[in-house]
Amino acid sequence: MLTSQKRRNIGIFAHIDAGKTTTTEQMLYQSGQIRSLGNVDTGTTQTDWLEVEKARGISVTAAATELTWKDTVINIVDTPGHVDFLSEVERSLRVMDGAILIICAVEGVQPQTEVVWHALRKLNIPTLIYVNKLDRIGANPRRVMAEIQRNLTNSCVPIQFAQGYEHTFTGVTSLLMNDEHDFYEQLVEAVSEHDDSILHKFLEGEGITNDLLKEKINLLAASCDLFPILFGASNKGIGIKELMDAMVDYLPQPKGSKNAPLAGVVFKIERDKKLGRLAYVRLFEGSIQNRNTITNVTQNIEEKVTQIRKVKGNKSEDLRELQAGDIAALTGLNHVMIGDILGGTKGIPQHPHMAVPLLTVKVEWEKEGDYPAVVKAFQELVDEDPLLDLQWQQEDRELHIKVMGKIQLEILKSIMENRYQLKVGFGQPAVIYQETPRKSGEGLIRYTMPKPCWAVLRFKIEPGERGSGVIYHSVVRKEELLERYQNEVARRIPEALEQGLCGWNVVDLKITLIEGEHHVVHTHPLDFAVATPMGIMQGLSNTGTKLLEPMLNFRISVPEQFGGKVLHDLSLMRATFDSPNQFEDRMIIEGIIPLATSMEYAVQLASYTKGQGTITTNFHSYQECPEGVLATRIRRGVNPLDQSKYILSVRKALS
């Protein structure tokens, strides 16, 4: 087994159709991992092995595989590019030591590219930028480099140059082997900005050896002070070996020791027909062997590992031992969830939060008898993607889920049919709004009847800054309200805020417990579980709430003759946007638009521009709705404002 001294963990990221899966397939082929090349269009690639991925030709899950190049074992995670599957991307980011960001040489920097880039920078992950599809009509490497510098970073620099482009593209040449190309001076200048020795040699006209320059690039790339740019055409296999060389040369090896206390994180859950539930784990410290019992510190439970499988596409082998720095799938962990930490937290990076489900839909099934099976299937799917956030309303026999977009619904429908042999449909997607307090106010609840019970709470509720979430604290002394009762109140606050006055989640507020009282005889801790939602809702009824709606960043590209029509449409949809930019005969418009008014616009735009107009979007933020916008959601369960009925329902005494 190779040690972590000869290992890389690398994620492949890009906007949809930039060529991630094709690039991964070429790496597997040219490294000798597979004997023949698969094809995205025919559904024969190693990392798109789900039936739905083969049928649609897109990645919908992050797929782990492995190859060996220059005596280095490289774990590669090929991630989805479509915005509907951003949750898969964010979970993969957490366990990577390095990244390859692929950018199409024709389309350039796209919205998803920017979203991933900002997440990579937040986590400080060393990144190679690979400009793909240089053989395509419209490819322009210099224009794309200018876009990268303008929209992503000034700290990027080419380490090779392309031999031609479009139909003349034949290959790439390293700048370390050709110091006469104009890119070479850019490279040396970029390195010299961070290294005085290179600057001195450059100014004095002294020769800079390839080994020295390579060493400096390695250090700067590892510290995220420099981001090397490479070129290629993955569909033809051009530039792939050079890209793998750069992965070994410029992306870091994982840290950690197999002899340290265990520390790992679960980033993916899958189900295998033969092996059952697979928990994909990145180990940052320590080691795990078959039959080991490990502690899940997130859930405070212990479970036994039955097998450790190294997954390579749709195949796997028994690894027997997982060491620090490596990634594998564990069987036997039947209760583990995505994001759970195993052992301890040392060395485990924070979880990036990029994906925000903006739509909610009702699940519908074909046959009444399918209801139990549909519930069970979606409970399993929530294990694999917690952001689905299944709402099972048993009383009404209804299921509701949250999704990123309509493509995700098509994929879920296909998965249900192929994996579970269940035919399901979905109701009309509805936008997920939020609520926030209009003003400050108080909520008081005296839960003292019917006996035995006693819980008195007074909350102060104040509006918070946009994006601040929920801030809760207590100023009540423990002598007035025992600590265990105060802890129960704190645990129930999130639940109490799930449904506000309009039925939406309440956010961006500060809640302070300013008064509390218990009874030495009549009080039970669960009294505060009952009282907290009533006190919070009483407070919200006094403050009032206002609606927040999801806003999207958008980028529209249309032929110039349609520009006036698009600008008129945007005004009607309540969009805000900058002055349009002109590129040759096309108009580019960027800005922010409400999801509620723009859900169908991509279809409309494609229709009246005859396919020549495109719109790409990604989540921006939640912002206040105009006063005339009303949106309510049917409440689940009894409203705590109807206190008598609510108490009876909680006590299971409601007939």
Image (cartoon, helix red, strand yellow):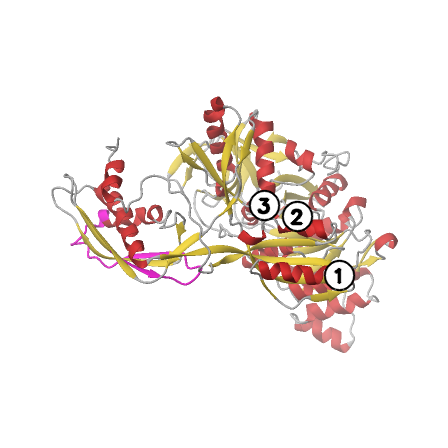
Viewer-closest of 40 and 179: 40
Which quadrant would the C terminus be assigned to in this image? top left
Sequence-wise first label, 1 or 2: 1
Sequence-wise first label, 1 or 3: 3
Q: Nearer the viewer, mark 3 or mark 2?
A: 2
The three-letter code of the residue at mark 3 reads: Asp
- Spatial CA distance of label 1 from label 3 is 31 Å
Q: Classify 630 as above or below 317.
A: below
- Spatial CA distance of label 1 from label 2 is 18 Å
In the picture of the structure, the residue carrying the numbered disc 2 is 603
The three-letter code of the residue at mark 2 reads: Val
In the picture of the structure, the residue carrying the numbered disc 3 is 84
- The x, y position of residue 613, in whole percent, is 71, 54
- The x, y position of residue 530, in whole percent, is 25, 43
Q: Is residue 481 magenta?
A: yes
The three-letter code of the residue at mark 1 reads: Gln
Which residue is found at the position 12% from the left and 45% from the top? 520
- Spatial CA distance of label 3 from label 2 is 17 Å
539 relative position to 465: left or right: left
Label 1 crowding class (10 Å Cα cut-off): few <14, some 14-19, many 20+? few
Q: Residue furthest left?
A: 521
In the picture of the structure, the residue carrying the numbered disc 1 is 561
Residue span colored magenta: 459-485
Label 3 crowding class (10 Å Cα cut-off): few <14, some 14-19, many 20+? many
Which quadrant would the N terminus be assigned to in this image? top right
